[in-house]
Image (cartoon, rainbow, N blue to C red):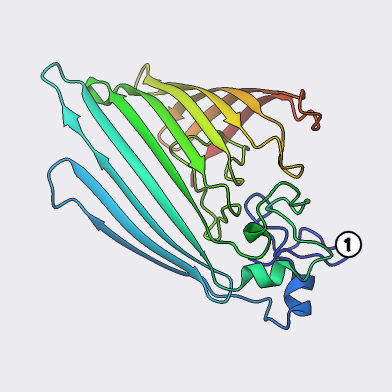
């Protein structure tokens, strides 16, 4: 959980893709707090109502943050074999000491360890925040694939943490290698996935990330295209490919984070 700021050891023992860099080792020590933490996760899931999957999660890093997450998805079958499945996720984040620790930095830092200029005064002293995400899936007959529209909005308060190494917007609007849970961020996503054969499937995603231009420590708005494929040579041996195109809007004067990504990987499961 604690971001390691030791010279020459910056990334050791850190989940660098989800960590809050303001909650670093030096800040915990300066605040007189223990930099080692416990993680408590409890899930309550039910399918007692036909076609409804519902989950209530409680997550806590004592002395840092507490979360309550409610999620539900309801499937509506149709006569032609298709089905509609709307769903939502509400994530409520409560400060449990992290805000005071962040104040021990030279200045309060956001999720990326950058300036909090443009954030509310409350966000600089507390991690209280929330997010809402929704999606609707059109499911093809015989599990051949699906179409998805997704949306997420982060409250204009603190950034959202991911202390359990999950992604708060995952399954709704998050595209791989993108972090869209900064305060006051809205994301729209369209996705299509299809199983062409039992061995070959593909997925195409398009996302629009609308970050807060007034927050200097948050990246520029961007659009993302992802085309992914998986080919299974055997049940244990498969190939994955990806083409990723990220185009950032730099009219706000922020850094250009545009890039193209091409991947080819082979995996064997022992």
Q: What residue is drawn where x is 77% and y is 25%?
A: 250
Q: Position of residue 138 (x, y in %)?
A: 29, 23
**Left or right side of 153 for 247:** right
Q: Position of residue 43 (x, y in %)?
A: 34, 62
- Nearest to the observer: residue 68 or residue 8: 68
**Left or right side of 73 for 134:** right
SS assignment at label 1: loop
- Nearest to the observer: residue 170 or residue 197: 170
Considering every residue shown, the one lying at the far right of the view is 7
* Residue that numbered label 1 is attached to: 8
Quarter occupied by residue 46: bottom left
Q: What residue is drawn where x is 63% and y is 35%?
A: 211
Q: What residue is drawn where x is 29% and y is 33%?
A: 86
Dot 1 surroundings within 10 Å: few (below 14), some, or many (20 or more)? Answer: few
Quadrant where the N terminus sits is bottom right
Q: Position of residue 153 (x, y in %)?
A: 50, 40
- Nearest to the observer: residue 269 or residue 188: 188
Q: Position of residue 265 (x, y in %)?
A: 61, 31
Q: Is residue 71 above or below residue 242?
A: below
Figure disc tally: 1
**Left or right side of 131 for 5:** right
Q: What residue is drawn where x is 70% and y is 71%?
A: 101
Q: Is residue 97 above or below residue 118?
A: below
Considering every residue shown, the one lying at the far bottom of the view is 32
């Amino acid at each position: 959980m604690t971001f390691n700021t030791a010279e020459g050891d910056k990334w050791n023992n850190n989940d660098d893709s989800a960590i809050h860099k303001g909650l670093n080792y030096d800040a915990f020590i300066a605040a007189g707090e223990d930099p080692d933490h416990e993680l408590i996760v409890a899930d309550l899931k039910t399918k007692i109502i036909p076609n409804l999957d519902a989950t209530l999660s409680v997550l806590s890093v004592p002395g840092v943050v507490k979360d309550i997450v409610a999620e539900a998805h309801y499937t509506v079958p149709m006569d032609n074999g298709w089905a509609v499945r709307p769903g939502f996720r509400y994530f409520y984040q409560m400060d449990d000491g992290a805000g005071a620790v962040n104040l021990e930095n030279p200045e309060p830092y956001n999720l990326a360890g950058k300036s909090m200029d443009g954030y509310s005064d409350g966000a600089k002293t507390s991690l209280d925040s929330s997010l809402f995400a929704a999606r609707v899936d059109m499911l093809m007959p015989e599990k051949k694939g699906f179409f998805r529209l997704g949306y997420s909005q982060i409250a204009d308060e603190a950034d959202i943490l991911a202390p359990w190494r999950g992604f708060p917007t995952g399954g709704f609007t998050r595209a791989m290698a993108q972090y869209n849970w900064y305060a006051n961020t809205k994301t729209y996503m369209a996705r299509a996935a299809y199983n062409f054969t039992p061995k070959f499937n593909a997925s195409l995603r398009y996302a629009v990330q609308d970050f807060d231009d007034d927050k200097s420590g948050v990246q520029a708005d961007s659009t993302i295209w992802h085309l992914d494929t998986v080919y299974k040579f055997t049940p244990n041996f498969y190939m994955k490919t990806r083409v990723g195109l990220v185009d950032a809007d730099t009219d706000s004067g922020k850094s250009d984070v545009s890039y193209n990504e091409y991947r080819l990987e082979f995996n064997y499961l022992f």
